Image (cartoon, rainbow, N blue to C red):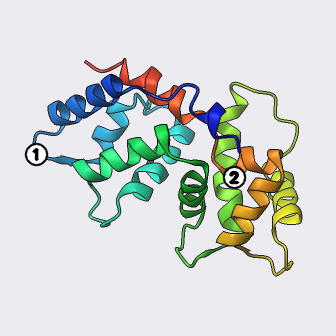
Amino acid sequence: MGQEESHSEAMDLAQIQELCITFMKECPSGALHLHEFKKIFGVASSSAEESLYIETVFHSFDTNKDNTLDFIEYVAALHLILRGNLEDRLKWSFKMYDKDGNGKLDRQEVKRIIRLIYKIKLHTTEVSMTPSEICDRIFELVDQNKDGQITLSEFMEGAQKDEWVMNLLKLDVNASSWVLQNCGKLP
C-alpha cells in the first residue's frame, strides 16, 4: 500500500555507493557527528526548523546513543529513508515522534513534530490547518481507545486506514528527493 510511489524516486546502487564514498571522505574516523550530517545533507544553519528536524532524524538513527553515526547506522538510515518498506518507515516515524521513548505518543510529542513539519512545508505547500488542529484531528482518527495516547499499533493502523493521516504520520517531507537533491551539493 503506497510503497510503489515511495520508491518512484528510490536511489539506485550507484547513488547509494556515492553516498557511502561521501561518508568515507567526510568521516575518515568512521564517526559522523551532527554538524557533519547537516553538512552532508545541505541543511542551512539559518533554518531553525530544518535544523531541528535533521537533529531529530540524526538522533533517531543513533541507535547506540553515542551522539555519532557509525557507518552501519548511516547505511541503515539511508536504506530506511530511501528504500524502506512502509511498515519500517512508519515504525521509524513513531520513534521520531516518541521523544521520551515510552512507547506511546502524547499530544505534546505529536504537536512538536507537526510544528516542525508545518514550518518546513509552509514554504512549499498551502497548509490550511494549524498544528493544534492537525494534532487534534490525528488523535480523533488514530487514538482508538481515546486515552489521550497513541500506541505503536494505533499509529500503524491509523496511518494505513486514512491517507491524510498516513501522509502526516510517516513524516513525509519527501526524504528521498531531499537526499538526492542535497547529496549533489557536496564539495
The answer to whether 64 is drawn above or below residue 86 in the figure is below
Q: Amino acid at mark 2?
A: Leu
Which residue appears at 34% of the width and 28% of the height? 13
Q: Is residue 148 left or right of residue 187?
A: right
Kindly identify the residue that appears in the image at 27 percent across and 29 percent down: 17
Q: 47 or 134, which lies in front?
A: 134
Q: Please provide percent x and percent y for residue 34.
A: 32, 47
Q: Which residue is mark 2?
A: 169
User: Label 2: how many residues lie within 10 Å, few (<14), some (14-19) or many (20+)?
Assistant: many
Q: Which mark is residue 29?
A: 1
Residue at image coords 69%, 40%: 2
Residue at (31% x, 46% y) in the render: 74
Q: Is residue 169 above or below residue 187?
A: below
Position of residue 155 measured from the top left corner of the image (x, y, whole percent): 71, 64
Task: Give the total of numbered labels.
Answer: 2
The CA distance from mark 2 to mark 1 is 35 Å
Give the residue type that dot 1 points to: Ser
- Whichever of labels 2 and 1 marks the residue nearer the N terminus, that label is 1
Where in the figure is residue 120, as x and y percent of width and height?
A: 63, 35
